[in-house]
Image (cartoon, coloured by chain):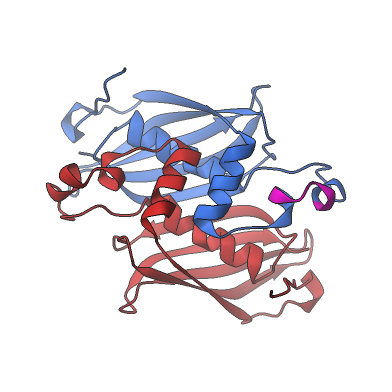
Chain colours: A blue, B red
Amino acid sequence: MSQLTNFTYDEITIGQSATYAKTVRELDIQLFAAASGDINPLHLDADFASQTRFGERIAHGMLTASFISAALAMKLPGPGCIFMEQTVKFRLPVCIGDTVRVELSVIEKQDRRKTVTLDCKAYNDNDKLVLTGTAVVMAP
Amino acid sequence: MSQLTNFTYDEITIGQSATYAKTVRELDIQLFAAASGDINPLHLDADFASQTRFGERIAHGMLTASFISAALAMKLPGPGCIFMEQTVKFRLPVCIGDTVRVELSVIEKQDRRKTVTLDCKAYNDNDKLVLTGTAVVMAP
């Protein structure tokens, strides 16, 4: 059993980075649909999805974006951090079975509120960018 | 059983709006944690959360943000739309039992790629803003 650790505001440095990877399971799409209420057939209905430009079901964009939330909460800054802002651009579809690797990098620290700005990139198994964005969190 | 309908790009007008509401259940937080891998104790551990500024467990910010995804996919433009970009600012915590109401309003249409920009606001039961942001989607 691994121990979760975190980085306090003072411990965080510009350029510090962290990685979090997760494979998108069929189940994850169903759990996300149930939690959010987003039952867009593009994610849940194979027949519908086969008629779209993607040709198959894709993961909810916000499910992939939620892996950023996990990366922030579990890796950098880690447990206890508070999510303030997020921007995301969805660049490529993510399919069932794809492993998404989120890479975080600290680009700015704001002393006044002890907030940290992180560049966020997510890649698929082929090292193609699937998502880019920026997060602002309050460090623990 | 209600029928899902959608609005095509040509049918969408500037100023068009839609609302989607969802109550945050204990279960939703657990489902979101499982789907995302985000097991920040602020969301899952009552003892830990009681020691924070919030005094109790709060919903993952990205869970609340996922209600925007649901509003886009279920209401405006509706099923078949493709999520391109999202910005969110988390303004107030959302707790278990809170009903979050997402209000979408079309602020721009881009003919070139048939994309639509929507203002996104989410309110709690007391009509306080919990989240603001902007979404860009490709209409069906």
Q: Which residue is nearer to you in this view: A25 or B113?
A: A25
Above or below, comparing residue B18 to residue B117 in the picture: below
The span picked out in magenta is: A44-48
Decide: is A104 above or below B58: above
Give the x, y percent position of residue A56.
Answer: 80, 41
Q: Please name the residue shown 41% across and 52% down the image.
A: B27
Compared with residue A12, is residue B73 higher up or lower down, i.e. above or below? below
Residue in the image at 65% along x and 54% along y? B83
Position of the C terminus of chain A, as image quadrant, is: top left
State the residue lying farthest toward the right.
A51
**In the image, residue A49 lies at what x, y percent?**
80, 49
Q: Does the magenta stretch include residue A46?
A: yes
Q: Position of residue A48 (x, y in %)?
A: 82, 53
Residue B127: x and y in percent read 34, 79
Q: In which quarter of the image is the N terminus of chain A?
A: top left
Q: Of B138 and A107, which appears nearest the observer?
A: B138
Direction from residue B123 to residue A32 in the image, left or right? right
Residue under the image location 69 percent in, 39 percent down:
A92
Residue at 40% across, 29% down: A105
Tell me which secondary structure the magenta stretch mostly adopts. Answer: helix
Question: In the image, is B40 to the left or to the right of A133?
Answer: left
Displayed quadrant of residue B39: top left
Q: Is residue A106 above or below residue B129?
A: above
